[in-house]
Image (tube, grey):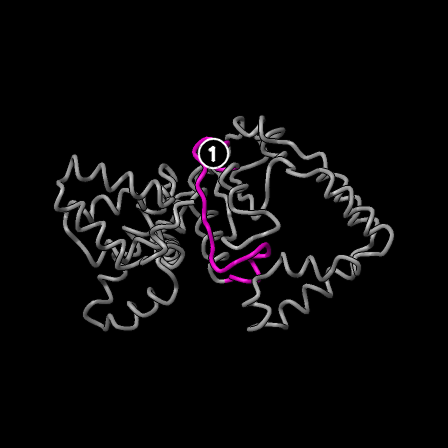
Amino acid sequence: MALAIRRPDLVASLTPMATFCKTVSPSSWVERAATVRAGGVEAISDMIMSRWFTPGLSQSRPEVVAEARRMLLATPREGYAACCDAIRDLDLLADLAGVRAPTLVFSGADDPASPPALQDEIRAAIPGAGLVRLSPAAHIMNLEQPGQTIAHLIAWLDHNRFRLGQPASRPARLKEGLANRKAVLGAAHVERSLAQAGAFSAPWQEFIMRTAWGEVWGDPALPWKTRSLLTLQTMIALNREEEFKLHLRPALNNGVSLVELRAAMIQAAVYIGVPAANNAFRWVKDVLGDEANDLA
């Protein structure tokens, strides 16, 4: 983020991941640096592991956590402590409005080290920034959700190829569309759709991926959050229940909050019709259940 502020000519696109732009509690970093200088990173390793990964990952894939712990323990104490000293004074918030690079913020829904509200702050400060929130995922999301992280990251880098004057070929557009489709709808859903297509529908699947997911969702003019809201509004207008439900959770992953979703649905009642909006509220309840009431 600091590089994008100070040398915008060097940054084609930006992906802040599980981070923050202003230190909330400088004293905590002073204390952590002192602890590490006195006792090495071993003194904080248990605490760090509990913040890096969700309890579920620690139980299901303990080898991932064990490897991360080995990496941490190999870190020189002074190197770690010096990073704490730097983070202690971090404050980029006022300067983020000057970032001109297309930005996609990555956020772990279960991150105690850098809570989602801090990524929301970055997204709000950088003009036009989008957000991807992965779940379940704590601080080291690329190890906890490697498939989702890589799909979103590759799709984002491909999006910004346009800024460098490198239009995609037909095969590249198809590849990009597949990555975008998996990133938004989930790899399992896409692979299931492709497996069920058969020879007759295979060209249709290719058309969808090349045009809808490659050319349209691959156009960086609109962030994915905006495209998700537009898609949901369109499905309300056309009474497409199945498609609305398909895109609902991906919209939340693309940064649409429940408050924003509700506001869009109420607006739909004015411009589309009360019965259509009433259906949409029912569809949200069908998909999210009690989660729909968590508006924090």
User: Where does the image place residue 66, in percent across and percent down from the top left?
Assistant: 68, 69
Between 40 and 165, the one lying in front of the other is 40
Secondary element under disc 1, as helix, strand or loop, is helix
Q: Which residues are magenta?
A: 122-146
Between 168 and 257, the one lying in front of the other is 257
Answer with left or right where residue 223 lies relative to residue 69: left
Which residue is depicted at the point 77% across and 48% down?
32
Q: Is residue 110 magenta?
A: no
Rendered view: 213 above or below 84: below
Answer with left or right where residue 116 lies relative to residue 235: right
Would you call the spot at circle 1 few (<14 residues within 10 Å), some (14-19), or many (20 or more)?
some
User: Where does the image place residue 102, in percent across and percent down from the top left?
Assistant: 47, 37
Which residue is depicted at the point 30% across and 56% down?
209
Rendered view: 264 above or below 149: above
Rendered view: 49 above or below 127: below
Residue at the disc numbered 1: 124
- Could you say which quadrant of the image residue 199 lies in? bottom left
Q: Is residue 135 magenta?
A: yes
Q: Quadrant of the N terminus?
A: top right
User: Where does the image place residue 43, in percent across and percent down from the top left?
Assistant: 79, 58
- Identity of the amino acid at label 1? Ala
Rendered view: 279 above or below 69: above
Which residue is depicted at the point 21% across and 59% down?
242
Q: Quadrant of the C terminus?
A: top left
Answer with left or right where residue 32 lies relative to residue 191: right
User: Where does the image place residue 36, in percent across and percent down from the top left?
Assistant: 81, 52
